Image (cartoon, rainbow, N blue to C red):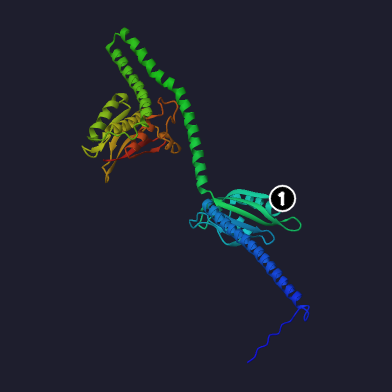
Amino acid sequence: MYYSILLYTQGENTYLIPALWAIGVALFLFMFISIFVQRRAGVRLKNELEELEKVKQNNVEYEFVLKAMRLCTWHIDVPTQMLTIDADYRDDKGDLVSLAQMPLSAVTDAVEKSDRERVRLAVDNICTGRSNTYHEVYRVMSGKAGMTYWEESYGTIASRDEEGNPKKIVCTSMRIDAQKEMESALIAARNKAEESDRLKTAFLANMGHEIRTPLNAIVGFADLLPVVESEEDRNQLISEIQKNNYKLLSIIDGLVSMSKVEAEAKSLVKQQADLVPVLREIADTFSPMVDPSQVVLATQFPISELMLTTDIGKVKEIVTNLVQNAVKFTAAGSITIGFDLPQSDKFTLWVLDTGKGVAQEDQQRIFERFVKVDEYIPGTGLGLSVAKSHAESLGGSIGVDSILGEGSRFWVELPLR
């Protein structure tokens, strides 16, 4: 078998070599351009991936902010007057008005009547372009009958049409029930502080007169004693001195008790004691303070012994303040100190009188500091406040049942132990 090799010389084919070079150069250029294009495509793809990652990260952060702030985001399509909720992370206790999409008029109709017209006007202003932003605080009627919740909303124009009219409005809203409750509590606290300051000023202005009146009587009657020869007159003067001395001591005791009551509210000295002798002792103490021809001071006990484990000193001070209050406001009739049979682990002691009584609107405020319903009756306005503080420190409560002009029944419910 024979093989023959054909060799062509340049002289035989003059275009072969240049053609080969042309093809090689073309292949080289093609490969270079391809590598350049692929590299640019790779860079562009890398940039797009980085941008996509940023978008994802922004979405995560955006969603985190919405959740942390408990916000609801929504937008209004102005031409169709439709409201669409995009995301809702508000606290939901089953009473939110929240649909994915609803007519704008239905949303404003859900606003509480007293706020509805104001909110409707604000929404209309931003939808018509009369204002660029929207901010309103209002109450929304929930799905539960008669219930409302507070909401605060912000909005701005996101896009406009060719004529410059608003096309899309983006908004956000959040529940502010806790904020409103805090505002109400702060307003109530401020009003109470202002009222307390006013009463304290009146108390200080009145204090000089309250102390000076019994003190003048004591000094005046004491000066008369050496010149009075009648034994009966001397005894009468001594009796008046004793009464005014007790009044003065009561005023000072009230001031001291009020100054200590806050510091000693949690300082209890509990011991076992029988309540009956304590109440009898209080009745005996106040007997000289009433006119027996006009007022009968009595006790009424369903049992002869009632053993307590409590701070008996605070209990005694509570009853003393209640009886003292009854003596001041009872000109005729009776004052009765007593208690009811214990129920479970509690019992109720009370002071009943046939005095002036307390009006319905004053029956809560008389237990506040410096409150005096009748400015013409001597007193500091602290006795009932001290009694209330002591009753609460013992784990009990205090109140009054009264009819104006017929009398009062002040009661204290306390634990037996």
Does 39 sit left or right of 318 as displayed?
right
Task: State the image quarter where residue 328 is shown.
Answer: top left
The quarter in which the N terminus is drawn is bottom right
| Residue topped by disc 1 | 130
- The image shows residue 75, relative to residue 4, as above or below, that is above
Residue occupying the point 21% across, 37% down: 305
Task: Name the quadrant of the C terminus.
Answer: top left
- Report x, y in % for residue 159: 69, 56
**Which element carries disc 1, helix, strand or loop?**
loop
Q: Is residue 338 visible?
A: yes
Outermost residue on the bottom side: it is 1
Crowd tier of the residue under label 1, counting other residues whose Cα lies within 10 Å: few below 14, some 14–19, many 20 or above? few
**147 or 126: which is nearer to us?**
126
Could you tell whether 104 is left or right of 23 in the image? left
Residue sticking out furthest to the left: 304
Badge count? 1
Q: Is residue 181 above or below residue 24?
A: above
Residue 304 drawn above or below residue 223:
below
> x and y percent of residue 330 in the render?
36, 30
Residue displayed at 40% across by 38% down: 403
Q: Observer-nearest residue: 165 or 416? A: 165
Q: Choose top left, top right, bottom left or bottom right for residue 390.
A: top left
**Depth order, front residue of 370/269:** 269
Residue 331 in view here: no
Given residues 95 and 382, the one toward you in this image is 95
The amino acid at mark 1 is Arg
Q: In the figure, is residue 132 to the left or right of 234? A: right
Give coordinates of residue 381: x percent, y percent.
Answer: 41, 29
The x, y position of residue 336, in whole percent, is 30, 34
Q: Residue at x 47, y 29 (%)?
A: 199
